[in-house]
Image (cartoon, rainbow, N blue to C red):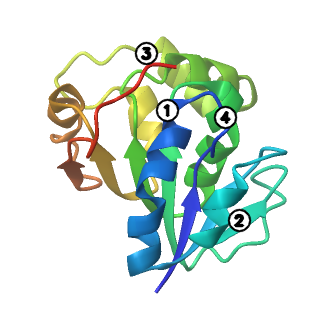
Amino acid sequence: MRLNWFSPLPPAKTDVAGFTARIASALAEQFDVTFWIDAASWDRDLERFGTIRKYRSARTIDGDPSDRNVFNLGNDPRFHRQIYHLCRRWPGIIVLHDLDLGGLLRSVSRQDRQLRRALRQSSKDRHLRPDLKITLEHAQGVIVHTRQAYEALRSDESSPVIFQSLPFPASEL
């Protein structure tokens, strides 16, 4: 089964890249993996686990959106801006590495009027914040690593949410 895996890769200074490196061999055991990145360099050792393809932007990618897609989404715009745009275009599973996407969303909202409005709104009920609802609207499912994120997302009925602890201690970069 083919899998498109969108994530920063080492040497990117984000633990999301480290997360992907740590689980790459397990992914390769189950899938024919294509690791998609928008960076100029990556740890060549990861090529033994799958194909690594580079893209410049969400608009220039030549992948097949009908494949299974996993989008690793964190809060740093340097590493996650294009992944955000891709998960807004294509269906897939979002691994939400951070519930507070403030820096990323403020960065991409300059081009997204709907998101700018959502960032100005405050949710008056217990449902999902408008900015996260927009981010996750095409998600076929969401995987989170913290109980806080799970509690915040589980009431939203548009996509199933799974809580899965990291299979390793989180590191500090």
**80 lies left or right of 59:** left
Q: Alpha-carbon distance for marks 4 and 1? A: 8 Å
Tell me, yes or no, whether the two marked residues, 3 and 1, touch with CB atoms within 8 Å: no
Comes first in the chain, label 3 or label 2: 2
Identify which residue, 27 or 148, lies in the foreground.
27
| Secondary structure at numbered mark 1 | helix
| Secondary structure at numbered mark 3 | loop
Identify which residue, 126 or 70, lies in the foreground.
70
Q: Residue furthest bottom?
A: 1
Q: Please name the amino acid that badge 1 sits on.
A: Asp
What residue lies at 47% left-to-right and 39% top-to-bottom? 134
Depicted 156 relative to depicted 61: above or below: above
Comes first in the chain, label 2 or label 1: 1
Q: Please name the amino acid that badge 2 sits on.
A: Ile
Would you name the residue on which mark 3 appears? 121
Q: Alpha-carbon distance for marks 3 and 4? A: 33 Å
**42 lies left or right of 166:** right
Q: Residues within 10 Å of mark 3 (few under 14, many from 20)?
A: few
Q: Alpha-carbon distance for marks 3 and 1? A: 30 Å
Q: Alpha-carbon distance for marks 3 and 2? A: 39 Å
| Secondary structure at numbered mark 4 | loop
| Secondary structure at numbered mark 2 | strand
Would you name the residue on which mark 4 appears? 12
Would you name the residue on which mark 2 appears? 52
Q: Please name the amino acid that badge 4 sits on.
A: Ala
Would you name the residue on which mark 1 appears? 15
Q: Alpha-carbon distance for marks 4 and 2? A: 15 Å
Let me know if residue 76 appears in the view: yes
Comes first in the chain, label 3 or label 1: 1
Q: Position of residue 125 (x, y in %)?
A: 19, 21
